[in-house]
Amino acid sequence: MIQDKPVVLYVDDSNVNLILFKETFKKDFEIILTEYPEEALKILEEKEIQVIVSDQRMPQMSGTELLEIVSEKYPNIRRYLLTAFTDAETVIEAVNVG
């Protein structure tokens, strides 16, 4: 029996990061990419997602804001936050909002 790959939604405003992520993980996961947090929320309404990975610093909405919405609407989705910046406040905020 062929098992479906887990679906990972990756949100990052850097197109290069999106491409690198997909190329790195495409053998093990079905990867869905978007540069826009609002589009990510629409994708979540339409498709069953097991994991969401989000960049922190994006122009429209921060990763912690996006993942807070996801945790409320879709509590069973695993959520991961990525950032290239070592900002203690961001880490504390991310932990506090889940």
Image (tube, rainbow, N blue to C red):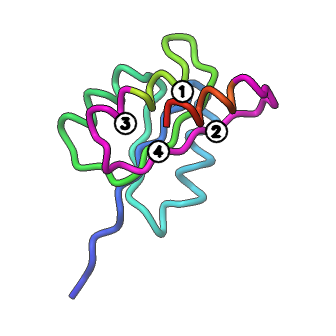
Q: Which amino acid lies under the numbered mark 1 shown in the image of this protein?
A: Gly
Residue 82 disc label: 2
- In-front residue for pair 26/94: 94
Residue 71 disc label: 3
Q: Give the number of the mark in front: 4 or 3.
A: 3
User: Are the residues flagged by discs 3 and 2 in contact, CB closer than 8 Å?
Assistant: no
Q: Which amino acid lies under the numbered mark 3 shown in the image of this protein?
A: Ser
Q: Which amino acid lies under the numbered mark 2 shown in the image of this protein?
A: Leu
| Residue 56, above or below 95 | above
Q: Which residues are magenta?
A: 69-89
Label 3 – label 1 distance at C-alpha = 12 Å
Q: Is residue 70 within the magenta segment? A: yes
User: Are the residues flagged by discs 2 and 1 in contact, CB closer than 8 Å?
Assistant: yes
Residue farthest left in this picture = 46
Label 4 – label 3 distance at C-alpha = 8 Å
- Mark 4, Cα crowd under 10 Å, few <14 / some 14-19 / many 20+, is many
Q: Measuring from the top left, give residue 27's x and y in whole percent.
A: 48, 68
- Pick whichever of labels 1 and 4 is earlier in the sequence: 1
The N terminus sits in image quarter = bottom left
Label 2 – label 1 distance at C-alpha = 8 Å
Q: Measuring from the top left, give residue 98's x and y in whole percent.
A: 49, 37
Q: Residue at x 51, y 43 (%)?
A: 53
Label 3 – label 2 distance at C-alpha = 16 Å
